[in-house]
Amino acid sequence: MNFDVEIYSPRWGHDDFYTITVDGNQLNIEAPVGRNCSCVYDQATDSFVWDSNYDSLIRIFRNDSIEAPESIYDDIEMIWRRLIQGRDSQDKFKENFENLADWISEITRSKPDFEY
């Protein structure tokens, strides 16, 4: 499954597209300019393991002045777990991810305007 979500970037003054790809037990989030982060679901331990490279999701967001909530990883894991467990369809997963992206954009747009 592969789809795009839009998240507002105050650094650039417009929405950027982030590509979400779910392939089996791996989820990848690709940001503009090819930066990405990924997470693997370990079925044996029922846990999620996020990559620890420089381009973690929070670093990607911070680079573009995007204000993601502290719970972002937990939020993504929750909606992905519902897909893995068959509680949500792929369409519902996409809808939930789009709602999460909209929420991040709303948080970011409500941030006080500072000179950078």
Image: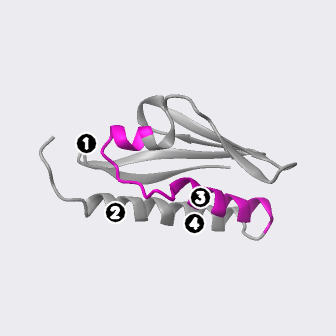
Residue 35, compared with residue 17, is above or below; it is above
Residue indicated by mark 2: 107
Quarter holding residue 82: bottom right
Report the front residue among 91 and 36.
Answer: 36
Q: Which residue type does callout 2 highlight?
A: Ile
Looking at this rendering, what residue extends furthest in the bottom direction?
87
Q: CA distance from mark 4 to mark 3?
A: 13 Å
Q: Earlier in the sequence, mark 1 or mark 3?
A: 1
Find residue 26 and report its horizontal and vertical position in percent: 71, 42
Write down the residue under mark 4. 96
Residue drawn at x 49%, y 28% is: 54
**Percent position (x, y) of residue 66?**
34, 49
Q: Secondary structure at mark 4?
A: helix
Question: Residue at 43% across / 38% down in the picture?
Answer: 59
The residue labelled by disc 1 is 12
Taking the magenta stretch, the answer to whether it contains residue 83 is yes
Q: Are the two marked residues, 4 and 1, in contact with CB atoms closer than 8 angstroms?
A: no
- Relative to 21, is 71 on the left or the right? left
What is the CA distance from the residue labelled 1 to the residue labelled 2?
16 Å
| Residue found 60% across the figure and 61% down from its top | 94
Q: CA distance from mark 4 to mark 1?
A: 25 Å
> Is residue 15 or residue 37 the one in the foreground?
37
Asked if the residue under mark 2 is in contact with the one under mark 1, i.e. CB atoms within 8 Å, the reply is no
Please state if 107 lies on the left or on the right of 32 as rendered.
left
Q: Position of residue 88 (x, y in %)?
A: 72, 69
Mark 2 burial class by Cα count in 10 Å: few <14, some 14-19, many 20+: some
Mark whose residue sits in front, 1 or 2: 2
Q: Residue at x 31, y 57 (%)?
A: 108
Q: Earlier in the sequence, mark 1 or mark 2?
A: 1
Q: Which residues are magenta?
A: 59-86
Disc 3 packing (10 Å; few <14; some 14–19; many ≥20): few
